[in-house]
Image (cartoon, grey):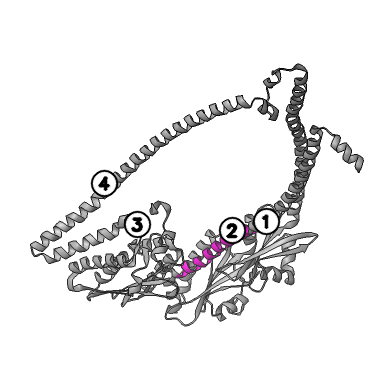
Amino acid sequence: MKRLRTAYHNFSLRAKLAVLSSAVLLAVLCVCQGLLYTYVAEYASRQSRAQANVTLTQAQTYMEAKLRNIVERLFYIRLDSAFDGVLTEYLLSGRPSARGVAMTLLSAPLSLHKATEPLISSMYLYTPEGSFTDMGISAEQGYRFETSAPGRAALQSEEIVLWGEAQRDEIFITHRAVVPVAYRFSVPGYEGDCVLLANIDQQRLTQYLQDILPDDGSDILLVDAAGRPVMQTWRRAALALAQSETALRAALDADFTEWDYGGEQYLTAHCALTNAPWQLVYLQSKTQLARQLRSFQLVFLAASLCAVLVLLLALTRIVHSITQPLSLLARHMSGLETRGGMQGFDYPYRNEVGDLARSFNSMLERIHGLIKEQELYISQLQEGKKRLLLEQQLKRHAELQALQAQINPHFLYNTLDSIRWKAERAGAEDISRMTTALATLFRIGLSRGRELISLEQETLHVESYLQIQKLRYGDRLSYTIEIEPQLLELYTVKLILQPLVENAIYHGVKEGERPGVIRITGRRTEHSVELCVADNGSGIAPGRLKMLQADLARGLSVNREGYGIFNVNERIRLYFGVQYGVTLESVYGQGTRAILRLPCITQSEVEQYVSPVDRG
């Protein structure tokens, strides 16, 4: 040990730097390799779970869209006026000839919806008087829907839409593997329930889900509420999971679980469908991920070895460049003793000895450098002054443009005020009140470009509109506004009450024979604000009301029944989220209520709902 220490001290400075630098470099590189591999492994695991969530969410979205489409087709068939008329005539007439006509007219929409939806294998309509098919596949002779499993479940269940178990088709001679979806309904004036049945083809459903999956060894499984597979699968892992009740239950009870099968490890995740009592189970191969990590480890190790060699070569060059000036300095210093004079002060390199030997010259050079820095600083100050002057000029120009942009609104308000003043002098009080209300309507409608205003301003805006309509309709229209005072300080999207009041006037008051009454109320619930616009008009027919409610719930931006209410609903949902918006309630022949659900937003919270562009 002593000899090693002595040998180390006898090393040249170049050798010591090379040994120490190499040791530090190798230690840092090994630590970085370990940390980086650990981080990459954890990151790959997180990405694997994130990818599982993304794939599962995508499959959930696609499946819910497909299943919703199938259910909506059943609803559309039932709501079709021609279909309803033929079915009612067939059930209530009691004529033997009615079945022949019904066979043609009732089978046509079943065949159409089957042909336009690939997942539907067959369609069937059951009535107590007789059954009808889509005419595409022959039905089993002697089949009785009332005694079959789907029939008993559909007729005995309290649910309107019933999702059956995966089974072999009992109705048609093909006996395909299907999942029945039944919609039970009744015909007015007829005792007994009817059932519309759509059979989902399991093979097509499986192929549809398999096409969504990425090509990374993953698989997916669709099960019902009892854990029975709804889809067919040919992959061993998914088939084994479906057959193992314990493993499947564990996968459905936790967000993520790990499952070993056939020497491979799988990560499982699940989610429930919102429009069917089914769940999706996603299987992702962790063994394949481990293979990818091992490949990455080998590549990273090879790259690290190459990096070590390159860094060692670079380190040798760096150590040589550091120690070479010291060697030159030593030779110059030793030569001063023999040469004498000041020849040694002309040392060409800028190291410690050279700086001491040329201290005076260095001082002069430093002074010269400071003068140049001062000149550069003065030049920068002058340029900054010019930029500041230019910014002030641009700011002044922007202020002038902003003042000019306010001329038109101010001109409009001043003109309306002049009209009101002349109307008052002429004794035309109706014109004066209408002009004042119109000016208030314009002022709040513009709101200096702001989209969120206080509920007090919104109330004043709709009251101005009602005053104008009151002057127009006279005794045919009356209104009341009852909003809790503490709500007036809250903020909301502007121009949301006036379109609803306009709908109430033109579809309720204007078309009615009795005097119209519009009542605007506002109250605060536990987590929101509810505003209601009610009228005593003719109301909305039930069928039309149901369609309007469905379109509002889906967030449509326009509808053939009217633009204003859908525009209000869309703007509320865009600003505050889909949990808020407009709902309709109506009793046909008595009146309609439009209810707005809004968040409780104070003045200090307004900035959270305003974009940077609108805020500017």
Q: Secondary structure at mark 2?
A: helix
* Real-space CA distance between mark 3 and mark 2, rounded to the nearest whole angstrom: 38 Å
Q: Position of residue 460 (x, y in %)?
A: 27, 66
Task: Say which label, 4 or 3, has the lower sequence index.
Answer: 4
Identify residue type, mark 4.
Answer: Gln
Residue 404's disc number: 4
SS type, badge 1: helix
Q: Is residue 16 left or right of residue 136?
A: right
Say which amino acid is labelled 1: Ser
Question: Does the residue at mark 4 contact the one at mark 3 (Cβ under 8 Å)?
Answer: no
- Provide residue 242's location: percent of width, then percent of height: 71, 67
Q: What's the CA distance linking mark 4 and mark 3? A: 18 Å
Do the numbered discs 3 and 1 sit on residues whose CB atoms are within 8 Å? no
Tell me which amino acid carries mark 3: Arg
* 555 sits to left or right of 517: right
Query: Farthest left residue?
Result: 426
Question: Could one spot residue 467 in this view of the protein?
Answer: yes
Residue, disc 1: 48
Front residue (pair 523, 352): 352
**The residue stretch that appears in magenta:** 52-78
> Looking at the rendering, in which quadrant would you find the N terminus?
top right
Spatial distance from mark 2 to mark 1, Cα to Cα? 15 Å
- Residue under pointer 3: 450
Tell me the residue that label 2 is attached to.
58
- Mark 1 or mark 2, which is nearer the start of the sequence? 1
